[in-house]
C-alpha cells in the first residue's frame, strides 16, 4: 500500500536538478507503437513535453498537462523554439475531467506509477472522461520485475489487469524497458533499463 501521491513540490525539486526520467525524447516503449497513435493526443504528466512535441511535429493535435508550472514553462519554450503548435497546461491530472474536450488518445508515461493507491480510482475515472469512447490509453510504468531500489513504485501485472477490468478493453499488456537519462549510473536499474509494462487500453462505452 502506498499512502499518498507525491506533490508538485516533490517534482519541482526533481526538476531543479536532472530528473532520471527526462531523456529528451519520446520513451522508446512509446516510439515503438507511435505509428498506431493517431488523432489527438493528451499527455498526462507530460514533464518537459517530449512526447507532446513528438506528436505535434507529426501534425497531430497535441496537449500536455503537468502540475509543475516550471516544467510546463520549459515545455512551452521548447515548442516555441521548434516552431511547433502544441498546448501545455498547468493542471492536476486528477482534474482532467475539467477539460472542455475529449481526446483520441491519452498518454501516461510515468504518471500512474507515482500515484498512491487512493488516487488510482479517481485517475481511472478522469482518464475515461477525457477519452472519447473507443479512444486509447497508452501507459508505461515500472513493473514488479524491476528489483526494489530507486525510482517509483513497481506495478504488478495483476494490479493493471484489475484496475482496467471494468469500462476498458486491455488490447495489449507487454513487458518493455524504460530508458533512464544518460547521467543515471548503469547499475541504478536492471541491465537494459528499468523493467516496465506498456499497457494499451481502449475505453469501452
Ligand atoms: C516520472 S515523471 C514523467 C514525466 C514525463 N511523462 C516523461 O516521460 O518524461 C511524472 C510526471 O508527472 C507529473 N505529475 C505527477 N503527478 C501529477 C498530477 N497529479 N497531475 C499532473 N502532473 C503530475 C510530474 O510533475 C512529472 O512531470
Image (cartoon, helix red, strand yellow):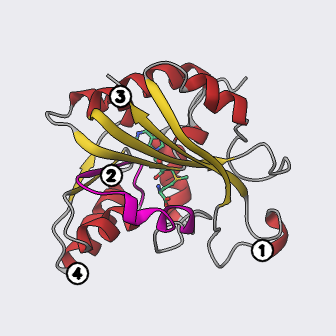
Tag in front: 4 or 2: 4
**What is the crowding at mark 1: few (fewer than 14 residues within 10 Å), some, or many (at least 20)?**
few
Q: Are marks 3 and 1 in contact (CB under 8 Å)?
A: no
Tag in front: 3 or 1: 3
Mark 3 CB near ligand 1 (8 Å cut): no
Measured as percent of width and height from the top left, residue 83 is found at 17, 79
Depth check, front residue: 142 or 182: 142
Give residue 131's quadrant in the image: top left
Q: Which residue is mark 3?
A: 128
Q: Residue 201, relative to residue 98: is it above or below?
A: below
Q: Which residue is mark 2?
A: 69
Mark 1 CB near ligand 1 (8 Å cut): no
Q: Residue 128, relative to residue 11: is it above or below?
A: above
Q: Which residue is mark 4?
A: 81
Q: Are marks 2 and 1 in contact (CB under 8 Å)?
A: no
* Sequence-wise first label, 2 or 3: 2
Q: Which mark is residue 185?
A: 1
**Cα distance, mark 2 to mark 1?**
28 Å
Please report the residue visible at 32 percent of the width from the left and 29 percent of the height from the top: 95
Q: Secondary structure at mark 3?
A: helix
**What is the crowding at mark 3: few (fewer than 14 residues within 10 Å), some, or many (at least 20)?**
many
Quadrant where the C terminus sits is top left
Instruction: Please give the range of residues in magenta.
Output: 28-47
Q: Which mark is residue 169?
A: none
Please report the residue visible at 31 percent of the width from the left and 35 percent of the height from the top: 134
177 to the left or right of 99: right
Depth check, front residue: 183 or 26: 26
**Cα distance, mark 2 to mark 3?**
25 Å
Give residue 132's quadrant in the image: top left
* Sequence-wise first label, 2 or 1: 2
Depth check, front residue: 130 or 169: 169
Q: Are marks 1 and 4 in contact (CB under 8 Å)?
A: no
Amino acid at each position: 500500500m502506498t499512502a499518498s501521491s507525491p506533490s508538485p513540490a516533490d517534482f519541482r525539486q526533481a526538476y531543479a536538478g536532472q530528473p532520471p526520467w527526462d531523456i529528451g525524447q519520446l520513451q522508446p516503449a512509446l516510439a515503438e507503437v507511435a505509428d498506431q497513435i493517431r488523432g489527438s493526443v493528451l499527455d498526462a504528466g507530460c514533464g518537459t513535453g517530449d512526447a507532446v512535441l513528438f506528436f505535434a511535429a507529426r501534425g497531430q493535435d497535441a496537449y500536455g498537462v503537468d502540475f509543475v508550472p516550471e516544467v510546463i514553462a520549459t515545455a512551452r519554450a521548447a515548442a516555441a523554439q521548434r516552431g511547433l503548435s502544441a498546448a501545455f497546461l498547468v493542471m492536476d491530472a486528477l482534474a482532467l475531467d475539467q477539460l472542455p474536450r475529449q481526446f483520441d488518445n491519452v498518454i501516461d508515461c510515468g504518471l500512474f506509477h507515482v500515484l498512491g493507491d487512493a488516487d488510482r480510482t479517481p485517475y481511472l475515472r478522469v482518464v475515461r472522461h477525457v477519452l472519447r469512447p473507443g479512444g486509447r490509453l497508452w501507459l508505461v510504468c515500472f513493473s514488479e520485475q524491476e528489483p526494489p531500489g530507486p525510482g517509483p513504485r513497481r506495478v504488478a501485472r495483476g494490479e493493471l489487469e484489475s484496475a482496467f477490468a471494468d469500462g476498458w478493453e486491455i488490447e495489449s499488456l507487454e513487458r518493455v524497458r524504460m530508458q533512464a537519462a544518460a547521467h543515471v549510473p548503469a547499475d541504478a536499474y536492471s541491465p537494459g533499463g528499468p523493467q516496465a509494462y506498456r499497457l494499451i487500453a481502449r475505453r469501452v462505452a
